[in-house]
Image: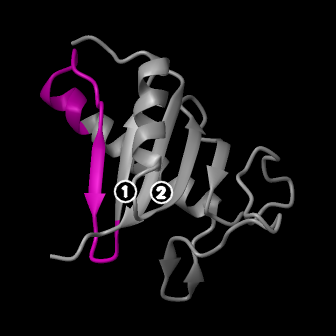
């Protein structure tokens, strides 16, 4: 199966991130899971990437992915996505070692995560779950 190029993946990611209801985006390093770029998620770290998207007021937007006790940090979401992608990759390897994970979608009652892994990055979109 042919792997999508990074340019094709980034183009798809850009298109998807402009759709209505997108709350947050993350770009992670494929090799380490480190946050390369983020928007819509607050960071626990004071050394957050300066390329993060800021609101018009210059403050990081924080009206994003919420948990019962508050907002998930970008680091929390990145770590959870990293583990989820690892588990999905293990499943695919067990089914067919020559196959790759190309897209993961996880829908909850409140949100949907779209995860697009490629050779260099893991691209993550979090958006509202459409009403049933």
> Does residue 40 lie above or below 12 as drawn?
below
Which residue extends farthest right?
A: 46
Residue at 61 percent of width and 35 percent of height: 32
Q: Which of the 4 image quarters holds residue 71?
A: bottom right
User: Circle 1 sits on which residue?
Assistant: 113
Residue reaching furthest to the bottom: 69
Q: In this view, does 81 lie above or below 11?
A: below
Write the start and end of the magenta stretch as one range. Answer: 91-111
Please say if 26 is above or below 100: below
**For residue 77, side relative to residue 58 (left or right):** left
Q: Which of marks 2 and 1 is nearer the N terminus?
A: 2
Q: Where is residue 21 in the image (x, y as percent from the top left)?
A: 41, 65
Quadrant of the snapshot with the C terminus: bottom left
Q: Where is residue 90 in the image (x, y as percent from the top left)?
A: 29, 36
The residue tagged 2 is 80
Estimate the x, y position of residue 15 in percent, counting from the top left.
42, 39
Closer to the observer: label 2 or label 1?
1
Name the one closer to the observer, 100 or 115. 115
Q: Is residue 107 magenta?
A: yes
Q: In this view, does 17 lie above or below 14?
A: below
């Amino acid at each position: 199966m042919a792997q999508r190029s990074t340019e094709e993946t980034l183009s798809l990611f850009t298109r998807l991130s402009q759709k209505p209801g997108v709350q947050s985006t993350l770009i992670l390093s494929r090799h380490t899971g480190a946050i390369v770029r983020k928007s819509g998620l607050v960071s626990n770290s004071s050394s957050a990437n300066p390329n993060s998207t800021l609101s018009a007021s210059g403050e990081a937007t924080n009206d994003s992915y919420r948990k019962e006790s508050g907002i998930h940090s970008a680091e929390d979401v990145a770590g959870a996505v990293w583990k989820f992608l690892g588990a999905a990759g293990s499943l695919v390897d067990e089914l067919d070692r020559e196959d790759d994970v190309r897209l993961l979608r996880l829908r909850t009652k409140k949100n949907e995560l779209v995860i697009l892994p490629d050779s260099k990055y893991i691209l993550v979109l979090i958006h509202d779950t459409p009403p049933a």
